[in-house]
Amino acid sequence: MRESRETGAGVTRGGEAPGTEYREEDPTATNGDEHSGTSALLEAVLERDNLFRALKRVKSNRGSPGVDGMRTDDLSAHLRVHWPRLREDLLAGRYQPQPVRRCEIPKASGGTRILGIPTALDRLIQQAILQVLQPRFDPTFSEHSYGFRPGRSAQQAILAAQRYVQDGRDVVVDVDLEAFFDRVNHDVLMGRLAKRIEDKRLLKLLRRYLEAGMMADGVATARTEGTPQGGPLSPLLANVLLDEVDQELEQRGHAFVRYADDLNVYVRSERAGERVMAFLRERFASLRLRVNESKSAVAPVRGRKFLGYQLYAWRGEVRRGVSAKSQTAFKARVRELTRRTAGRSLRQVLDGLNPLLRGWKNYFRLAQQSRLFKSLDEWIRRRLRMLQLKHWKRGTTIYLALRALGRGNEAEWKTVAANGGWWRRALRAGGVLTPGWFDRLGLTRLRG
């Protein structure tokens, strides 16, 4: 067997100490003749090349440590020592996933979202499972489903929604599932998986991942429902569960878009929308899921947000825009990143701000609102001017610093340096600290 050393590989292909490498002739390996088709999925999961790809993905994603404190950078060394035993335990059905670490992150809409962070080892195993199951499941999913699928995106979902509305379906059945990832019923989900997976060892392992406890403050709590966000498998399992509803909506001829647990069905009248909503309430209830009535509605498309966007009419066309809530959340984040912090230069602030601007610009690249992006660019530059002026503090220092830049004229320097509120001074400084000056500093523009 050809030897090679892949950087970061925890399951080595050669050159390691005897007994530590993953070998094709490993005595724990199962003879390929004993299983066939979907009954040998666990062997496919543990196949060497699949594990190398999973390891590479987990290490590139990095992420926070789980309950054992192991970082993804430490995973390779751990596997070199422990992989033969781990593989044997997985094949024998003895492997027990560790609890996930509870983590709360703020939501843009208020409140918090609960994440369950698996250990680095469990992320590796989940990723390896995902790489085997997704190619088998994904081709059978509805064409109206866009979330967490290869080659599909939120932007494609928005374009599909725009086409439906442009076609005259200007009433939306906007469905939000209440705490979806926290309320997935394990028995219902496992029943759906059992229809597609014959390998009972893999089914048993999936059940154990669903039931792995959640640890907070050193105390592990058993989990009887839910597939917490944070692990590689959760999005695929969500699609498996919700695909039945997608297929039924397709059979009924509905125009709809689903992205994870966000579902919009587009109809031509409120009466038709109420019928669809009644059907969906009943159908989701059969999956032990609840529609969040406070966030769901049958309403005109205009004014409803979907995936951060909103659709609006302009000169007889349906156009794509950034929702008001998304704009508010974005500006709040910019304020946080550009507040005055001791010891941080303007360039350091830009280093933290630019990734946000690039990500936001890329996500909302479909928005047909050039004036909005221009306005936000101007607002951001004014925030940064204010920050820089505050760093200079006194009028005399401001005057000398502006003069040293060699831009503008005496009158402008004195006007900016004169007493007044910082926000007003930042406006006056626009003729000196120009857009071109910020371009040279490397500030990302939203427009253009």
Image (spheres, rainbow, N blue to C red):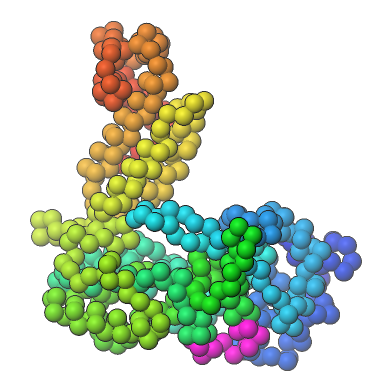
Give how far across and how far down residue 277 sits, in percent. Answer: 24, 79
Q: Determine if the magenta segment contains residue 202.
A: yes
Q: Residue at x 59, y 80 (%)?
A: 207
Residue 433 appears left or right of 106: left
Q: Is residue 183 above or below residue 248?
A: above
Q: Give the residue at x 34% y 25%.
A: 386
Between 213 and 156, the one lying in front of the other is: 213
Residue 448 horizontal/vertical position (percent): 32, 41
Q: Nearer the viewer, residue 176 or 252?
A: 176
- Residue 376 is drawn in which quadrant? top left
Residue 167: tell me if it is visible.
no
- Looking at this view, is 159 or 193 the one in front? 193
- Residue furthest to the left in view is 315
Q: Which residues are magenta?
A: 191-204
Q: Is residue 358 left or right of residue 267?
A: right
Q: Is residue 107 above or below residue 18?
A: above
Instruction: Tell me if residue 415 comes above or below residue 129 in the rendering.
Output: above
Please provide percent x and percent y for residue 311: 21, 60
Magenta part, dominant SS = helix
